[in-house]
Amino acid sequence: MKQSGQDKTLHQAQLATLTVWGGEELGHPYRATQTPIVASAAHAYSDIDEWYDVALGQQPGHIYGRMSNPTVEVLEAKLCALEKAEAAVAFSSGMGVISSVLYTFLCQGQRVVSTKDSYGGTNKIFEEFLPRMGVEVVLCDTLDHDEIERQIALGCDLLYLETPTNPTLKILDIQRLVNAAKKAGALVVADNTFATPINQNPLSMGVDVVLHSVTKYLSGHGDVMGGIACGTKSLMDPVRHYREINGAALDPFAAYLIIRGIKTLALRFRQQQYSAGVLAEFLLTQPLVESVNYPGLATHLNHAIAQQQMRGFGAIVSFVLKGGMETVKVLLPKLQYAHCAGNLGAVETIYGPARTTSHVENTLEERLALGISEGLVRISVGIEETEDLISDLKQAFEATQTSLTQTW
Ligand SMILES: *Cc1c(COP(=O)(O)O)cnc(C)c1O
């Protein structure tokens, strides 16, 4: 892209500054202050030699939208700044990036070690698609680090981590498991969607590939889907090649919305994370609540690990309601400042049970085997005023109590 001639150096900049300026150091064409949407499937050349050089990657430039696009390239550069990565490759959804990374690096006869708690779609790849390809997948109890280490030592080509987990908010000790994986010569892939680059940068802990569903916090407004992988150039080159051939490229309009969203990530996340802590404490006091999952609670099983490896505890809280799905059905519709929806990470607060959100792809038996009760509700805390979120939950609990007493 022809640049406007500004040249900013961001080496010293902190994360909030990088969300705004990262990937945009060189300015934009036409002296625009914002990244233009380059809506062009192909790029034209009158010099055939130059065209060929660009096609071979010997000269910068663009050929065809499935290979690269100038708007998408700005998003990829922004993620490099946020995740301290050499290279990044954007995809049309979070699952698009997860499947593409796994299929890029795995082949028949290999062995993957991961945990039972991972995003439902990821779990389906592990249980359904990888075994079909002849890849062995071992899913360990997420809370049993000894078992995970033991399975890695038995042979591991790829270790797949997701922390905090969705929707149970368990925490994996990244450094400890990376050490075990390195000993076994395994590639380590981590889904960083819940933590966001604001809370943790797994690459700096030795993880090889970091993934995001940018549909969530990064874009932040629930109006676009996307995924991105980050890592060294030598690891991202084959991922880019996989995207080019298999086709799950990100649309430049989507890339534009995601870039715009990321600029407010640090601000949004600060507020959401603060409210999440307050809501978690409030939930603990509620008679209808059986248990609360939030890594910021001193009672959380992995609180110490979270404190050590994360800069904050995140903005997702989950809790188990007494009475299971019956109570869920009564409580959720009573909330005023909440969507009941299968999404998270948006500016609006979003409530949903695992049955219709993170684990909609799984059967009841599969959910129970994964330790996900039917009364589990996930809150993706939005940017609304904290007090309003608390009073909303309070009135919903009171009304639920009343209506349950009447029916029982
Ligand atoms: C939503 C989500 C995904 C899948 O992303 P999509 O953009 O919905 O395809 C993967 N991992 C985690 C942790 C998620 O929350």
Image (tube, rainbow, N blue to C red):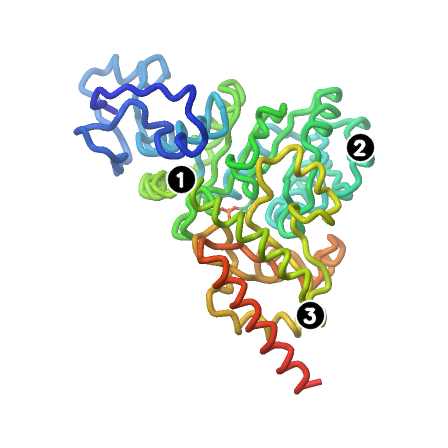
Task: Using the image, tell me which numbered label, if any, was put on residue 262.
Answer: 1
Give above or below for 312 relative to 46. Answer: below
Residue occupying image coordinates x 49% and y 19%: 233
Q: For the residue labelled by badge 1, is the local secondary structure a helix, a strand or a loop?
A: helix
Around disc 2, counting alpha carbons within 10 Å, would you say few (fewer than 14), some (14 to 19), or many (20 or more)? many
Residue 377 lies, in percent from the top left, at: 62, 61
Spatial separation of the CA atoms under disc 3 and disc 1: 37 Å
Residue 181 lies, in percent from the top left, at: 72, 25
Horizontal side of 116 relative to 198 (left or right) equals: right
Check disc 1 and give the amino acid type. Answer: Ile
Spatial separation of the CA atoms under disc 2 and disc 3: 39 Å
Q: Circle 2 is placed at which residue position?
A: 151
Check disc 3 and give the amino acid type. Answer: Leu
Q: Circle 3 is placed at which residue position?
A: 288
Horizontal side of 402 relative to 38 (left or right) equals: right
Marks 3 and 1 close (CB-CB < 8 Å) = no
